[in-house]
């Protein structure tokens, strides 16, 4: 059964990776889309593709979730236009740097916390009230295995994703008594631009992260997001960890390296 068709879905970080794959997946179900990201050109390209292929309504917005005033203004604009999302996918997030805590770059920490934690808070704070008044909706937060298990040289990123786990659980409790669902999807290793961003554009280092095994793809996570959103009204999946078969924890990945 398709319970997604005709729903209005707002996705942050929609210009690449899991966000872009999710836009395609929701469009294939016949959902209407509001796609937010910082890269205008990529958004425009994706909008044209989805409208042409799936004949669905697509709206784009250049938006930095770290900008509280911009998020608040956009949420007010949507409500004034009676464009309250049925589904909010808090996908925008990033890892920056791979350092021991005492050697970490403070500017990396600030950008991660502002995006992963405060950005999720801003979007949720300004979109949820309209959902509560309507008494329906679904918030999907993109967490990480890093929000369940800490690993060396990832303390600040781990902290930001542990915060997402806490916010997801707290949000679900605060919405008790409403018909609004709350879900966190927490992936392991997914091959997107994630590692290139983490290593500040070092492609060679980023590619090594995914060598010797088959990582997850953005499309894999998008399939799971649409599955979760498509469940019956009385079913809520609170938290879902998904790993590639070759990965069994944040620390353990089986790699079969080729010999030359």
Image (cartoon, rainbow, N blue to C red):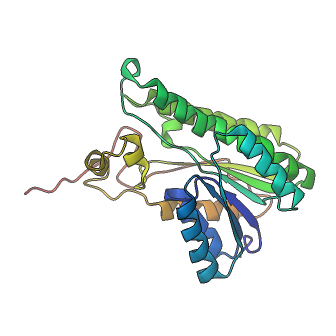
Residue at 78% x, 38% y: name it.
Answer: 173
Q: Residue furthest left?
A: 260
Q: In the rendered view, tell whether residue 73 sits above or below residue 134.
A: above
Q: Position of residue 75 (x, y in %)?
A: 79, 50
Report the number of numbered marks: 0
Residue at 72% x, 44% y: name it.
Answer: 70
The image quadrant of residue 122 is: top right
The image quadrant of residue 150 is: top left
The image quadrant of residue 36 is: bottom right
Assign the N terminus to one quadrant of the image: bottom right
Assign the C terminus to one quadrant of the image: bottom left
Describe residue 163's horizontal placement relative to residue 71 as left or right: left
Q: Residue furthest front?
A: 41
Q: In the rendered view, tell whether residue 244 sits above or below residue 96.
A: below
Describe residue 171's horizontal placement relative to residue 37 as left or right: right
Q: In the rendered view, tell whether residue 75 sits above or below residue 107.
A: below
């Amino acid at each position: 059964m398709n319970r997604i068709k005709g729903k209005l879905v707002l996705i942050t970080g929609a210009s690449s990776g899991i966000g872009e794959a999710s836009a395609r997946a929701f469009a294939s179900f016949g959902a209407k889309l509001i796609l937010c990201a910082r890269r205008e050109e990529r958004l425009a390209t994706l909008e044209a593709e989805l409208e042409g292929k799936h004949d669905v309504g697509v709206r784009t917005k250049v938006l930095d979730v770290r900008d509280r005033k911009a998020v608040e203004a956009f949420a007010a604009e949507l409500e004034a236009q009676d464009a309250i999302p049925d589904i909010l996918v808090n996908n925008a997030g990033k890892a920056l740097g791979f350092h021991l805590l005492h050697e970490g770059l403070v500017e990396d920490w600030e950008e991660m916390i502002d995006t992963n934690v405060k950005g999720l808070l801003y979007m949720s704070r300004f979109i949820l009230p309209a959902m509560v008044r309507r008494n329906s909706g679904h918030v999907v937060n993109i967490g990480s295995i890093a929000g369940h298990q800490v690993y060396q040289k990832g303390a600040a990123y781990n902290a930001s994703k542990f915060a997402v786990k806490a916010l997801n659980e707290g949000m679900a409790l605060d919405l008790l008594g409403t018909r609004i669902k709350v879900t966190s999807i927490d992936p392991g290793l997914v091959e997107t631009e994630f590692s290139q961003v983490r290593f500040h554009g070092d492609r060679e280092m980023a590619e090594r992260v995914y060598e010797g095994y088959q990582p997850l793809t953005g499309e894999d996570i998008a399939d799971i997001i649409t599955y979760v959103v498509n469940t019956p009204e009385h079913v809520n999946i609170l938290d879902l960890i998904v790993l590639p078969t070759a990965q069994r924890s944040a620390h353990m990945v089986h790699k079969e390296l080729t010999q030359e």
